[in-house]
Amino acid sequence: MFENLRRAPVNCLRVFEAAARLGNFARAASELRVTPAAVSQQIKKLEESCGTQLFQRVGRNVRLTWVGEQLLGSVSE
């Protein structure tokens, strides 16, 4: 499922993990000391690498999709 991730920058995975854990791009940005736009761009890059959406946007928060949950399990290991 995640064959294309070998080409994804490690920074995308780091940003993904923070956003998934915190459930909010702005909070992830604050933790990583980058802008929310930078977090959004990294997530977009990762979603393009995966070929699927990893988050459902819910207002100001985000929720992982099923694929996002699978990826989080892999990244966390």
Image (cartoon, rainbow, N blue to C red):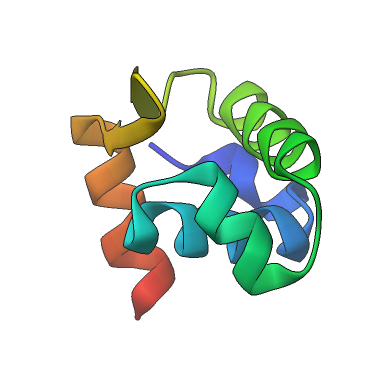
**Does 12 sit above or below residue 3?**
below
Residue at position x 25%, y 49% in the image: 70
Closer to us: 42 or 26: 26
**The image quarter in which residue 41 lies:** top right
**Residue at x 49% of width, y 64% of height:** 18
Looking at the image, which residue sits at the far bottom?
77
Say whether residue 58 is left or right of residue 41: left
Residue 56, by quadrant, is top left
Q: Name the foreground residue: 36 vs 14.
A: 36
Image quarter (top left, top right, bottom left or bottom right) of the N terminus? top left
Quarter of the figure with residue 45 = top right
Q: Residue at x 36, y 75 (%)?
A: 76
Instruction: Residue 6: give x, y in percent of width and height.
Output: 68, 54
Image quadrant where one finds the C terminus: bottom left
Q: Position of residue 58 (x, y in %)?
A: 30, 20
Is 43 placed above or below 74 here? above
Measuring from the top left, give residue 24's x and y in whole percent.
43, 46
Farthest left residue in view: 66
Q: How many marks?
A: 0
Of residues 71 and 18, the one nearer the viewer is 18
Above or below, 17 against 52 in this view is: below
Apparent side of residue 21 relative to residue 49 in the rendered image (left or right): left
The residue positioned 65% from the left and 22% from the top of the image is 48
Is residue 61 left or right of 36 when viewed as pictured?
left
The image position of residue 69, as x and y in percent, is 23, 47
